[in-house]
Image (cartoon, helix red, strand yellow):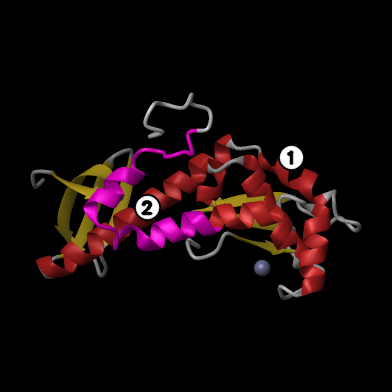
Amino acid sequence: MPAPTTISVDGVTLTLTVERKRVRNINARLRGTQLFVSAPLHAAQRQLDTAIPDLARRLIRRVRAQEINAQDDALALVQEVAKRFPTPPQVEQVQFVTTQESRWGSYSAVTRTIRLNAVLRAMPDWVLKAVVAHELAHVFHLNHSSAFKQLLRRVYPDTDRADMFLSGVSWLVQQWEHLPPVERGLLTRAASYGEEMPASEDGDG
Ligand SMILES: [Zn+2]
């Protein structure tokens, strides 16, 4: 067995063991923080260097999705939103997913399943519920017409506030790489208007 090394993927450090075998493809297994990779005998190292982080990321995300879906009872939350509709859409399953990064959610009336971007679980419930309301409103209106927005605001009055919250999150993610270090540093401390603080002499704070 070759000596294990470590790799870091999405901030998770894994112990990596690569074994050359008579296999056709590069395969990976994750056990806790141990990543076992089997690679074809003649696969180039450069090929492994590219493939292994991708495989690791996929496995880490899959495990994380399982964790979130196991511990969560979001179904009650989602059904509570569904009930607000004049004709409540049927939801029997909630799946938090770690694979559809570019979408906040989707709903299938056929499988009665609502799929939500897993990062929503870490956000306030009212934001998560707003995404649920948005996806369920698409049962009645396919696009973002004024009728859609009217229904959505009636069913979930916080919808505009949640959209702004999510816009702020998206803005930060998109801008992060382009922000100068000082601004990034400032953003690592949560800023507020400071209205809860007594006014200081120079009005700073
Ligand atoms: Zn939409």
> Which three-letter amino acid code belongs to the residue tagged 1?
Ala
Q: Does residue 57 belong to the magenta stretch?
A: no
Left or right of 179: which side holds 40? left
Task: Look at the image and say whether residue 176 sits in the magenta stretch.
Answer: yes
- Choose top left, top right, bottom left or bottom right for residue 142: bottom right
Q: Which residues are magenta?
A: 167-194
- Label 1 element class: helix
* Residue 15 appears in the rendering: yes
In the rendering, at what x and y percent does residue 173 appear?
40, 58
**Residue 77 placement (x, y as % from top left):** 72, 41
The residue that disc 1 covers is 76
Task: Identify the residue under disc 2.
Answer: 59
**Residue at the extreme right:** 86
Q: Is residue 132 visible?
A: no
Q: Position of residue 189 (x, y in %)?
A: 36, 38
The answer to whether 186 appears left or right of 20 in the picture is: right
Query: Split into 4 quadrants, where in the image is the N terminus?
Result: top left
Secondary structure at numbered mark 2: helix
Residue in view at x 8 percent, y 44 percent: 3
187 vs 156, left or right, is left
